[in-house]
Every structure is written in structure tokens, then in C-alpha cells.
Image: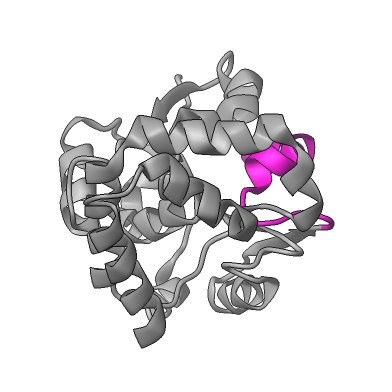
Amino acid sequence: MTKNLILIPGLLCNHDLWLDQIAQFEEDYDLTIFDHTTHDSLSEMVADFLQDAPESFSVAGLSMGGYISFELMRQAPARVEKLVLIDTNARADREEQAAARETLIRRADSEDIREIARELTPFLIHPDRLKDEELCGRIVDMAADVGAEAFQRQQRALVKRPDSRDLLPQIACPTLIICGAQDALTPPKVHQEMAGLIPGAQFHQIDDCGHLSTMERPDQVTQLMADFLAE
């Protein structure tokens, strides 16, 4: 029986976010990279995806991918076999966070998306990795691939997203939560909160790692995922 694994990228990210995990799992899983670029609401993204999705699947989502995973759990909980939440957050935006997104939406009308991505990069990776030109270049290239218009749609979807904490106690499938210890956007405390609300959830923190853990510490993330999915 084919095992299906859905990988959901974060904001301004594409399949490259999951490059190392794809290499690990492509032989044993039918992989799908979730397209989160064409709608400006999470509910529409998920409803569109579910029309042609496998009957059952495991899901891994990072950051925005986690927010989409929560919407999957709202719309089709019985179809999700296992859930992996990475560097994400169940809370809705605070007022100042929503305002910051609105500012970025406006800036993307006239500014180069690559420059916006370069400005955001220090918030996405561990400070020590800012000297890693290859990693920083991959982050900017992903942003350019997603493009300004899709970025604006993504930000509008995130501004509108609901608080998912009331959903978490209802999650019945096995759940793995991973975060970078130095994640500046979704720090360990919000992952610990999720782990306390999801029944039986496993929680792992990766040292010397920021927000984009699948790229920063790919070996550790991949091993944690492999062990969990094999259980």
C-alpha cells in the first residue's frame, strides 16, 4: 500500500525548503508539495487541495505550513494519519503582527521581493548562519520563485487565520512537534504550548537552530521525522 506524505512549505518557500527530506523519503513515500500560492485564504487552499488529494496521508508543515496543517485538521481530520508540526504556532496574529504583514503586502507592490527576503532572512535562521552564503541564497531564490503576488496572497491568508488552540485537544492522530531552539518567529514556548494541548504529542527542540530548521539542521529534522513516521 502506497504511503502518502504531504510536505507544506512556509511563507515565501517552495520545495527547496524540504530538499533534504525529499531525498530521504521519496523512495518510500508518494510525496506531494502543497501549493499555497494561488489563494488568499487557508480554507480555500485546503478545500482545493482536498479535491484531488489521496484518501489518507501524513502531513508535515513548517511555519505557514503548520497553519495550513491546522486547517487540514479542521476540514479532513479522519484523512490525516500522522502530523508533523515544525517551527509553527497555533495562535492567531497579535495586532502588531497583523499590522506588520499589511505593511509587507503594501511594500511588495513596488519593492523587489528579493530585497524583502534579504531583509527577513535574519529572522528566519540562526545568527551564525547569516554568513552561510549558500543557505541565504537559497532563501532568497525561494522567495523569487514564489513571487510578490503570491506572497501578498499568503500574507492576506495569514492575517485572516483563526486561533487554532481550541482545535488542538481534538487532534487524535500521532503528532510530532519540532522547533529550533533559537527560532525568533515561533519560539520554543509556543511549541511547548501546542505539545501540552495535543494529546500524546512528541516534542523535540533542536539546538543552535532558527526558524527554517529543515534547511539549517536537515539531518536532525529528517531523522526525527523518519523515526516518527516509521512508528
Q: Residue at x 59, y 76 (%)?
A: 190
In magenta segment, residue 124: no
Q: Residue at x 43, y 79 (%)?
A: 165
| 49 left or right of 117 in image | left
Q: Residue at x 84, y 57 (%)?
A: 207
Judging from the image, the colouring scheme is one colour
Q: Nearer the viewer, residue 23 or 166?
A: 23
Q: Quadrant of the N terminus?
A: top left
Question: How far across and down, in percent of the image, does residue 126 sit?
Answer: 74, 55
Question: How far across and down, in percent of the image, does residue 224 sit?
Answer: 73, 43
Residue 91 in which image quadrant = bottom left
| 92 left or right of 40 in image | right
Q: Is residue 80 above or below residue 120?
A: above
Q: Is residue 37 above or below residue 68?
A: above
Question: How far across and down, in percent of the image, does residue 99 sit?
Answer: 32, 78
Q: Is residue 6 visible?
A: no
Q: Is residue 47 above or below residue 169?
A: above
From this viewpoint, which residue is outermost toward the top? Answer: 27
* Magenta extent: 207-231
Q: Is residue 62 visible?
A: yes
Q: Is residue 124 above or below residue 16?
A: below
Magenta-highlighted stretch: main secondary structure? helix
Question: How far across and down, in percent of the image, does residue 193 sit?
Answer: 60, 79
Q: Quadrant of the C terminus?
A: top right
In magenta segment, residue 216: yes
